[in-house]
Image (spheres, helix red, strand yellow):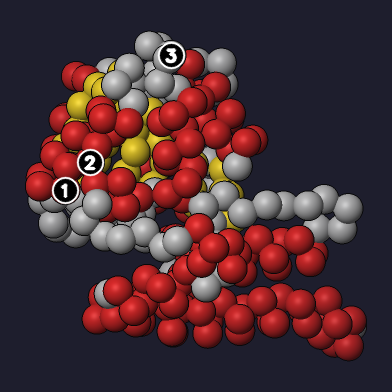
Amino acid sequence: MTHAVERLLASGRGDRPPEEFRLANAYCVALANTEDSYGTLLRGQGVNFPDGQPVALVLKASAGSASPQRVRGPSFFQAALQQSETDPSIRHFFVGSTDATLTKLLDEVKRRHPNLTIAGSYSPPFAPLSPTYMEDLLAHIRPAEPSIVWVGMGTPKQDFVSAAIVEHLGISSAGVGAAFDFVAGTVREAPLWVQRSGTEWIYRLVQEPQRLWKRYLIGNAQFVHYVVKHALLPERQAVEA
């Protein structure tokens, strides 16, 4: 987490080139194996951090002497806001969700971090990604001249939007999913012990079963499938050779 936040803020200050920050959970990994465009995105420019205990554990098991740690998206979002509060060179912009949620988010962010520099916010229409959609979104961000753009749209949309922001505006961007709702108070955040236990997905599923059942039940099963397949791949190649 420390490394992730420091890297983002360094890019926001201009000490590093702008880049896309992706918080990849089990669903992201599963989706990257079933949708070529998303898999290409995750393998392309930008940086991926393991958001979700299962992804971090798998990385640890295959990392040898390294010790990858989880970078939970909502915690990453809140830590970056806190650590940049007294740095006026870092200007934050928030994209996504609804106007009502963004209003509550901004009110709460200002309450927690009164010295934070907020460049602006925009709630785009709920519509598929298209050239027109992106032109409209970029046109709302560009005049505000932010240093960091936070995108709360869900996977995979937020990652494609973040990539476009970096490419066309030269501004670092991060997709942080439900972080906007958690800070705004429109969705209850899991207790800390649940977050650390690796069962936060169950907590979220109970809260929003109709919206999240496919993502967690099918997505998690696919993740396990691809992890096992990857683990067995070297052995399979040796047998075939």
Which residue type does callout 3 highlight?
Asp
Asked if disc 1 and disc 2 are in contact, CB closer than 8 Å, the reply is yes
Q: Amino acid at mark 2?
A: Leu
Instruction: Give the mark nearest the N terminus, 3 or 1.
Output: 3
Residue holding disc 1: 101
Mark number, residue 105: 2
- Residue 89 makes an appearance in the image: yes
Mark 1 residue type: Thr
Which quarter of the picture shows residue 112? top left
Q: Earlier in the sequence, mark 2 or mark 3?
A: 3
Secondary structure of the residue carrying tag 2 is helix
The N terminus is located in which quarter? Answer: top right
Secondary structure at numbered mark 1: helix
SS of the residue under disc 3: loop
> x%, y% of residue 235?
86, 82
Q: Is residue 217 above or below residue 15?
A: below
Q: Position of residue 136 (x, y in %)?
A: 14, 38
